[in-house]
Image (cartoon, rainbow, N blue to C red):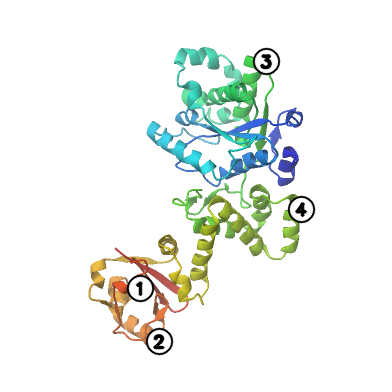
Amino acid sequence: MDFLEELQWRGMLQDMTPGVKEALEKDVVSAYIGFDPTAPSLTIGNYVQVMLLKLFQLSGHRPIILMGGATGRIGDPSGKDKERELKTEEELDHNLEFQKRQFDKFLDFEGPNGAIVVNNFDFYKDMNVLNFLRKVGKTLTVNYMMSKESVKKRIETGISFTEFSYQLLQGYDFQCLFEQHNCLLQMGGSDQWGNITAGTEFIRKNLGQTAYAVTTPLLTKADGKKFGKSEEGNIWLDPNMTSPYKFYQFWINADDADIPTFTRYFTLLSKSEIEEREKTYADDPRELKRLLAEELTIRVHSKEDYESVLKVSELLFNRKASKETLLELSIQDLKTVASEIPSFSISRENLNGGLNIVDLLADATQILQSKGDARRAIKNNAISVNKDKISSHETAINQEALLHDQFLMVENGKKNKFIIIVE
């Protein structure tokens, strides 16, 4: 594929410096994107830039992942209206190693254009402050640095010298990658334009060479809100922080108006395949969202996780879901279910010798407000435990009934579902 044409039709090209197209006509060109390890995991917001690297690699070129072991210690002022809180070095190192492993799933690290990972801490660890000021600080004038949007926005509210110097580090990063890995291009979001072009200036002034920049638009949702967050917060690419089910639901619950953009940003389908899909399902936006959610859940997580999501969805939303569906759920699946519907915790001791169903419903859990309500619900054939109807108010629930020795699912009618966690 032609990389720039690919970005163009996908709507992923915001700005670029002159000469990029000609530079990319070489056999294999290296380009990088920086990722500061200030969070414990990559987010779906980071995935925009992951896709940029993926498309670059599919076009035959080499992606470089620059992990910000150094810049993460400083804090990027871009897009921030106040100083960041600095993370501890131990926290940053832990985050960096975890994020490096996450990239293994998204890019190919083998072959003639295999991706490589570089830590920018290696550029600075042996450099003292005087060397930094002579070698790095001398490159850019304060006037040049003050002209950058990320700095101008902060002048009135205040910016520390630490964050003010961030563009020096990012600029020198580009110079080091240019020298050590023949990296001609830096990419990123449009909010990084000032930092990226600082790098091209470093290479022009210090090396007498030409380097290039490409940025993507900042992705926002149809309602104008920042992409990558749900009502509960960030959508993480780590399944322990955002479950595959919640990840899947993020796409399913997206605004219909966002799906054309999301499909172009995140699917690996060709232009003709996307247009054919949109034509086929022009009157069925729910299917467009389902297809996107399926592809991304499998790619970010796994086929097995996607199948698990379907089982959980079947149990939660299909009123006719069978007992077999429930029994097929893993411990993690049931934990996901427990996070989506009302849940109660009870002590394992309560089940010793069997716990009367009425006491379970009214006293141990408050699924029903009173024992009288519980008896009436049982009499009306409304109560099920693990998909088995309860026909007598004298029924006892014991440990043998537990799913994975930990869970009970109780239903009151067709709509009201509850999970009991036995601890």
| Residue in front for this viewpoint, 11 or 243 | 243
**Mark 2: amino acid:** Asn
**Mark 1: amino acid:** Ile
Q: Which residue is mark 1?
A: 367
Instruction: Determine the CA span between mark 2 and mark 1.
Output: 16 Å
Instruction: Determine the CA span between mark 2 and mark 4.
Output: 56 Å
**Mark 4: amino acid:** Ser
Task: Name which residue lies at 53% across and 50% down.
Answer: 229
Asked if disc 1 and disc 4 are in contact, CB closer than 8 Å, the reply is no
The first of marks 1 and 3 along the sequence is 3
The first of marks 1 and 4 along the sequence is 4
Q: Is residue 305 visible?
A: yes
Q: For residue 152, which numbered disc appears in the image?
A: none
Choose mark 3 or mark 2, whichever is in front: 3
Q: What is the secondary structure assignment of the residue under circle 4?
A: helix
Instruction: Determine the CA span between mark 3 and mark 2.
Output: 84 Å
The first of marks 4 and 3 along the sequence is 3
The first of marks 2 and 1 along the sequence is 1
Asked if disc 3 and disc 2 are in contact, CB closer than 8 Å, the reply is no
The N terminus is located in which quarter? Answer: top right
**Mark 3: amino acid:** Gly
Q: Which residue is mark 2?
A: 380
Q: Which residue is mark 3?
A: 208
Q: Which residue is mark 4?
A: 272
The first of marks 2 and 4 along the sequence is 4
Counting from the top left corner in percent of width and height, residue 395 is at 30, 82
The first of marks 3 and 2 along the sequence is 3
Position of 141 relative to 69 (above/below): above
Asked if disc 2 and disc 4 are in contact, CB closer than 8 Å, the reply is no
- Residue 82 shown left or right of residue 394 in the figure: right
